[in-house]
Amino acid sequence: MAFRLLERLYADPPMVDVWSEHGTVRAWLRVEAALAQAQADAGVLDRADADAIGAACRLDAIDLDRLWAGARNVGYPILPLVRMIADKLPAGPDGRVHWGATTQDIMDTALSLQLGAAGDRLAELLVAFGDALAQLTERHAGTVMPARTHAQQAVPTTFGAKTAVLLGEVARHLTEMRRLTADARVVSLFGAGGTNAALGPRSAQVRRALAGRLDLADTGVPWHVARDRVTRFGLGCATVAATCVRFAREVIDLSRTELGEVHEPAGHHRGASSTMPQKANPISSEAVIGFGVATGGAAGTLLRAMEAGHERAAGEWQIEWMAVPVAAEGSAAALRLAGETAAGLRVSPAAMRRNLAADGGLLMAEALMIRSAEVLGRERAHDLAYAAAERARRDGTDLVTEFGAELPAGVAAALGSLRIEHADYVGEAAQICAAAVREWHEHKGAMA
């Protein structure tokens, strides 16, 4: 099997198991066994035959090397799988395995089971990440720091207000992932050309019974070539991973030596360099970016899988075989790492206070302009603040001093003190934090 270093280091084991060789074959076997029981429910098969088929649908009864050799020859794995199941059965039930179904019915119904399990795992990881962000948001609702736009200091904000925005994203992702997962849990049993002719007049009854036995939704419309549910699930994985990447980039940027406002969890040799003893690199965040970018790339290819023509794909389906596991596993790994990083994030309010004073206090330029605009008017106040900022940056002086030096005496007296505390210019930061935490709990509690 292929070795991938990033997965070996940081993959999410429960998600890997969903898409593993054994996990995938188990899903196919589960569908074949449930199909036989559903046909017995509808009177298409004898119950004894269905029980015998179900007993033969065991992973330990499958020669995996033989299965894959047969699949390489056929192009698909279900024919050799069915033959191996039948080989374990006596005369009678051996001829009733896979009755009336087509390969894609089995694989798509198994895929629905896998997508359901994957979506449940992603929801668990979203809850863990969201809970960690909620704690940071509450704890640091009043921890003042520089807001940065275009990578430069802008105005004061709080660290809680920053994480509140991420928390809002995660809350929406949780609700959407639950919806996508529910949509993906749908049975497929429509036969060779999508009309279910081989199952005869009881075809719809069998399909309903199969859906019920697998806890899937029934549908009266075939979806062999309608891949919108699968694609939306993959794109959902990508948007989740993209939020994780945004969080990771924040951690990387804010942990730069020049800023030092946050750091990943500490540990002996964690993030160490083989040659620079002082290094403590943001390794989890770096891995999140790797997984997140790969997830987005894989999910994007699913749009091409939607181009399948007629009643069965000719190559487009195979895109899913590669892309869906990569998207689900990458999203889960990114989420797991992001959640662990958020839960153990080391925040430095002292570094944030220090950085507020950097650049001569220029991040208070808007606050100064707004206060003086009450007397000067906005445009004149803007021009004076702009000129004062230029001088302060050029000469290494203080913004307030430079601004005050240009004011007429009467204006200066009317304005009073021009010194504004950073904490007094964070606007709705506290309310934003409270709203984000409240909405998080609402999203988390819905349909839980």
Image (cartoon, rainbow, N blue to C red):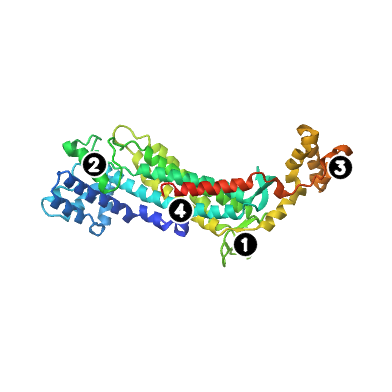
Nearer-N-terminus badge (1/4): 4
Q: Nearer the viewer, mark 1 or mark 4?
A: 4
- The residue type indicated by label 3 comes to Ala
**Mark 3 Cα shell of 10 Å, populated few (<14), some (14-19), many (≥20):** few
In the depicted structure, whether residue 338 falls above or below residue 316: below
Q: Tag on residue 405? A: 3
Name the residue furthest bottom.
Answer: 268
Whether tag 1 and tag 2 are in contact, CB under 8 A, the answer is: no
Q: Label 3 to label 1, Cα distance in Å?
A: 45 Å
Inspect the image, locate mark 2, and give the three-letter code of the amino acid beneath it: Arg
Q: Amino acid at mark 1?
A: Lys
Residue to which mark 2 is pinned: 207
Q: Mark 4 is on which residue type?
A: Leu
Q: From the top left corner, tell me how far across and down residue 31 is, in percent.
A: 26, 49
What distance separates the C-alpha of mark 4 from that of mark 2? Answer: 33 Å
Residue with the mark numbered 4: 125
Q: CA distance from mark 1 to mark 4?
A: 29 Å
First reached walking from the N terminus: tag 4 or tag 3: 4
Label 3: state its secondary structure: helix
The x, y position of residue 264, in whole percent, is 58, 59
**Residue position for label 1:** 279
Residue, x 55% and y 58% (percent of image)?
A: 283
Residue at 59% across, 59% down: 281
For the question of whether residue 285 can be seen, the reply is no
* Mark 3 → mark 2, Cα distance in angstroms: 82 Å
Disc 1 element: loop
Q: Residues within 10 Å of mark 2 (few under 14, many from 20)?
A: many
With 121 as the anchor, is 245 left or right in this view? right
Mark 4 → mark 3, Cα distance in angstroms: 55 Å
Residue farthest left in this picture? 91
Residue lying at 89% horizontally and 39% vertically, measured from the top left: 409
